[in-house]
Image (spheres, coloured by chain):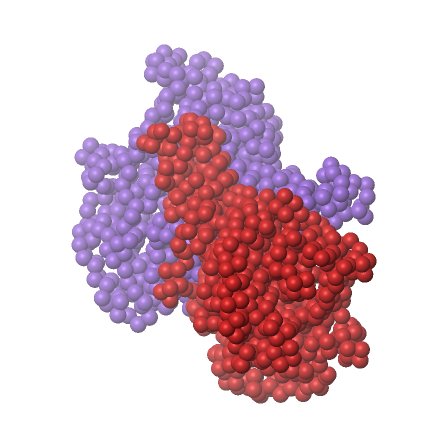
Chain colours: A red, B purple
Amino acid sequence: MIGVAVPRREDRRLLTGAGTYLDDLDLPGCYEAAFLRSPHASARVLAMDTTAAKALPGVIGVWTGRDLADLVKPIPPKVTNPKLYDVPRYPLPPEYARFVGEPLAVVVATSRHIAEDALELIDVDYEVLPAIASTGAALAPDAPSVHDEVPGNVAVHLTQTAGDPETALATAPHRLRERFVVARGGGHSMETRGIAASVDRATGEIVVWPCTQSPHYTRNLIAYFCDVTEDEVRVVVPRDNGGGFGPKAQFHGEDAVVPYLARLLGHPVKWIEDRSENFVATMMERTQVHDVEVGFDDDGRLLVVKNVFQHDQGAYCAGLQVPTITLSTLPGQYRIPNIHTELIACYTNMVPTSSVRGAGRPQAVVAMERMMDRIAEHLGADPAQVRRVNLVQADQFPYQVGLTFRDGSPLTYDSGDFPALHEAVLDRFDYAGERDRQRAALAEGRLVGIGLGAYVEGCGLGPYEGARLRLRRDGTVLVTLAATPLGQGYETVYAQIAADGLGLDMRHITVATGDTASIPFGQGSFASRTTVTAGSATLQAARRLRERILDVAEVLLKTSAANLCFVDDRVCVVGEPDHGLTLTEIAQVANIGKHGITLPPGVNPGLETTSYFAPERAAYASGMHAATVEVDPETGQIRILRYVIGHDCGTVINPMLVDGQVLGGFAHGIGNALYEEPHYDAAGQPQTTSYLDYALPSAVEVPPVELVHLYTPSPLNPLGVKGAGEGGTIPVPATVANAVEDALRPFGARITSLPLTPAKIVAALTAG
Amino acid sequence: MIGVAVPRREDRRLLTGAGTYLDDLDLPGCYEAAFLRSPHASARVLAMDTTAAKALPGVIGVWTGRDLADLVKPIPPKVTNPKLYDVPRYPLPPEYARFVGEPLAVVVATSRHIAEDALELIDVDYEVLPAIASTGAALAPDAPSVHDEVPGNVAVHLTQTAGDPETALATAPHRLRERFVVARGGGHSMETRGIAASVDRATGEIVVWPCTQSPHYTRNLIAYFCDVTEDEVRVVVPRDNGGGFGPKAQFHGEDAVVPYLARLLGHPVKWIEDRSENFVATMMERTQVHDVEVGFDDDGRLLVVKNVFQHDQGAYCAGLQVPTITLSTLPGQYRIPNIHTELIACYTNMVPTSSVRGAGRPQAVVAMERMMDRIAEHLGADPAQVRRVNLVQADQFPYQVGLTFRDGSPLTYDSGDFPALHEAVLDRFDYAGERDRQRAALAEGRLVGIGLGAYVEGCGLGPYEGARLRLRRDGTVLVTLAATPLGQGYETVYAQIAADGLGLDMRHITVATGDTASIPFGQGSFASRTTVTAGSATLQAARRLRERILDVAEVLLKTSAANLCFVDDRVCVVGEPDHGLTLTEIAQVANIGKHGITLPPGVNPGLETTSYFAPERAAYASGMHAATVEVDPETGQIRILRYVIGHDCGTVINPMLVDGQVLGGFAHGIGNALYEEPHYDAAGQPQTTSYLDYALPSAVEVPPVELVHLYTPSPLNPLGVKGAGEGGTIPVPATVANAVEDALRPFGARITSLPLTPAKIVAALTAG
């Protein structure tokens, strides 16, 4: 079944409105919570009076951070570094607010509207403090401190070096430098965040239904805040989840507060984030500032790249994944003997940073790919040719980049064929023909440009993911995954993988996800990691279950397993389809014990297998995009005339679903390239807090795409797969920016800031 | 920790009233069910009018068997045989009632008293049919049929033969025959049956809290009746359970009806059996009639035993375990070259038969041990000596009895030392001295007698049992068992076993049981099987988890596992107690993945191990009891003057708990010997339906006991254990009956019917 475009099993219910999302859960009598959020980017809470709020009819309770001393424990960063200057992030900080939207108190009431009315009655006396709202402001010599304990506001400063970049820069025949400012938006999932919790009064179990990408991570942190063992918390992710894209892999303060209060009250409590809250309180990516310098020879061959960048970590470090990914993504598909890549992550008075689809890679790709075009421009060479001479070659894998991965191991690309991918995309794009058409258009006075953008994506990361397979009483196989889907089609894909591992038609296979009671350990769905990890675990567990089933069948059928095969839902002797047993019959013996008071000698009971797959290092997906754009010099509007995506994620389990991921990712990339920017003013007040202010692309804004696939299996996992969830997004800003600058080249206009809003285009034309 | 008398972890909560039983569960707004039960032993329901009942305020609904067509599916017998004439047993039979107490309709109301009031309003038109209320009546030539499809009322007729019993009988120097009528009572657990169910409105899961000995068996049958897969049903046995003793291992009709209605109504429903219902509707053992004939030589050496017995199966066959156990228990500790053992199981109009502690063995032991005394009497020999010459010798193990076990394998005793046990008991009893004292008492005109009784008990049966061990985030190990305790102290015993397997102090170990969501397969706690099966599974899983933990530690500590040991909750290098890691730290790496995005090479994640242990055949516990009694010839009252129990259940995990089992079993045996008999009149009306009519022994009736232990480990499991739950019960009726007949020997009175009520003693004295 691997490689077959099986229709998604999820679609019928989703398309008929029968999906089950968090807010669809029927929790009788459930209370609703609402959070009081800081209106200031930096403030000290001098006093908070909740008397009037508590007196409102329908209000069950009001708690400030000072009232919930059990919760004054820091939420640890998801990814950390020994050099991080960490500051505690509390679910409900008792004294200081560090960003607009930070929760400071919570109301629980019989309805959400009562809870929101009660918020209005809370009287807070704030001492407003100076705020930092950009990395530039954070790093200014006289900048106030976001946290007193971190003067200078640098959360972490990391440098990686390969070769001797300073000497190489000093001696390179050609040098170019530029500053790129790259903004990225938030996750903007259709379904906002939310969490419901209840204490099972019969068992004492705290049952939590979160909108999360990481059920076990959420469980472990709730257990930590409620001071119970993880077995006393059951996290059940609702069957459907309206998108994640990164922020839902984070643990936000509300995720601790709601279960804690459900337990305190002995009553179900729910909180569904509204869209206004989502804009200010859900983690996001924001702006990075890249100072990049390259040295190269007359052929455009890279001799050295130096990239120093500022990363906005927000008010707390929820995790260092984004900037450390940026740090190591810079070299991309190119052989670069000397590299200097340097991260300065700053604390600012804005919501903390989360990974968002692409997770720090689009910014690095902008820095690298924009410079490839600048090299071509400088040499009067063709940008495709400049890339070609620099590409890592197909026979160089495993390729050691010269940098270090964030686990300390050498950064190593496992497999790929960048030249083949490059040529395949140019071929499909009809690059020469497109250049001819560009010249013809320019001759007509139209501003048409062509851009290329290549990337690698480290994906399929550990530490591990698990799968548990079980033969059920009815002869079907249940696949239980720890990871939970956000719409990717796990019920389909993992049934395909299990079908292959079992050698059984996938109609006998059901996939269940997201319930920590069903499989004890897991990480979650993020970082384009799940097909690699959970997919491999599923394959391993399925192969093992097949062996286990055949071991039982060989005893019962008195033959050797080598003579047995699956025919539909039966295990039969090869060539004797009438001589066999149904899977139900096998389950009856080995799992139910129907055979009687002893099992037939040789039968090992309990046909369930569990496998955890821990990849030794990241697999590297790669891709190359090519775009033709036309710019309207009057309005600054950008129209994408053509867009070709070349994509290599190794083995493809379900081509239709991979295409869906790539195209969805591309839409996200278009948002990053042209529209999305969470804007804060200098006082740290978010300015884009509704879809009137924040331009999220719709179907109208996303142009048609042509897709080219290459398949270089990863040697690091038994399926040969790599991640496919983010590749569509990563190079879009760089590719579009390259095309736009190419279109504006007659005016010498410089494109150094993303997204490419019409105002910026007009300004660039004016400056150029 | 194996062999240590660790105090029970359960006792604090039980002794302080903090136990959590089914009726303690807090299910908000729970409805309550009550059942309309047949007042007739055999009747056809011509019409049932529930209109008035439905109209009673507070009644949610009333359903007859005809209303719930989904439930008209037979409950399969728990143990069956190809020769069984099976008849369907329905949860709520739609047309025929076959015993008094059979549920025919159910009311669900907002309270139990309203539900019971509504029962009174149901108008039923019965056609009363002739009833059968004993095996004698069932087998009479002109007997009416309990079921039309089984004329003659024989459910199953099974014979087992070793050697040539007919020839041996014809040629034996001496022959004796007798008929023994042996009644047994019910389980009479302090907590009656009960079940509560609820549909989790968030997940759709049917959650069921039953008072059961077999959570997975219950889950599977509920799934069958609700027509869902077993994963859609979660059975959680409340933490505490007020006794089982056999009947709670059965699936009764109410167990299907209550979850079905909870699902139908989308609302929690509970039914707690009241004591009146328990007397008529909970399965029980009742009377067996044994015709036994022995042939022997001048030394009392057994040449042949023939035993033909009638077993009362009740109105349906819930399982054939009781009579088939009787069938194979007969030979006991003796070498018998020729055996004929024959079962005639009859349908009668009484509640079906369940196993009850001892499960068919006490009856076989009465037949065999009473005849050993008769042989001694016939030869003028000492009963101890007659036994001695017949005992299987210590060097004869594994000993093949010559019969077949019910799985078709040769009936084989694994280990034991019957002569040593025999002598140890006689020694402790001071047998010769006791005989002297008996003679002195007889000389004084006191009716004092001595009785012996020996048995073997096949225990530790399969098909299998499982255990799952997991290292938790806090460094403790959670042991999850499929089997659920009925008061035996699993939280203590399995922590001891796991501690031994892990090499870890048991304070770091927690035991959880009875939740089908935590381990997918299991059988249950019955038939003295769990320490053998779940104990071995726990040991295996613990040893494997220790290896897995050390595998991780050897990577992290950069040494070999051979150099590592547990010190408290740390894994340390041997001889370097400061060089180590806590179990929490190991869990953080291998289970949480805290190490980062890749695991250290060589670390296999997911420190959880699952083991299922399937014994190849039964282990045989054995025992020998000795009693001195005095009979008051005026009142027929029996006073037990001394009682010595010799007990061999192989390795003992916790001597205090084994002693508790033996003494509790002995109390049960005293009930069987002297007091308990569920009496039905000839029309099938139960006559003993309260503790005013039914004599259950209390502490006052149970005499002091002296205990002697022998330990012959079983070679069939890694712990060497055998079952300990029933041995205290099994030989008590035979031993006491032997002693009483010995006391009455001066009068030549014959003891052939149990229990030994005063009326029977007086009658025997009058007849003798």
Residue A183: image location, x then y, percent: 62, 72
Q: Is residue A231 left or right of residue B258?
A: right
Of A339 and B169, nearer the camera is A339
Is any part of residue A599 visible from this angle? no
Instruction: Please tell me in which quadrant of the rendered image residue A673 appears.
Output: bottom right
Residue at figure coordinates x 81%, y 41% from the top left: B575
- Which image quadrant: the N terminus of chain B? top right
Residue A226: image location, x then y, percent: 62, 65
| Above or below, A563 relative to A212 | above
Residue A511: image location, x then y, percent: 45, 52
Is any part of residue A123 visible from this angle? yes
Residue at figure coordinates x 52%, y 71% from the top left: A443
Residue at figure coordinates x 68%, y 83% from the top left: A683
Of B395 and B78, nearer the camera is B78
| Above or below, B69 relative to B645 | below
Residue B448: image location, x then y, percent: 50, 32
| Total marks in image | 0
Residue at figure coordinates x 53%, y 71% from the top left: A442
Of A759 and B498, nearer the camera is A759
Of B439 and A105, nearer the camera is A105
- Which image quadrant: the C terminus of chain B? top left
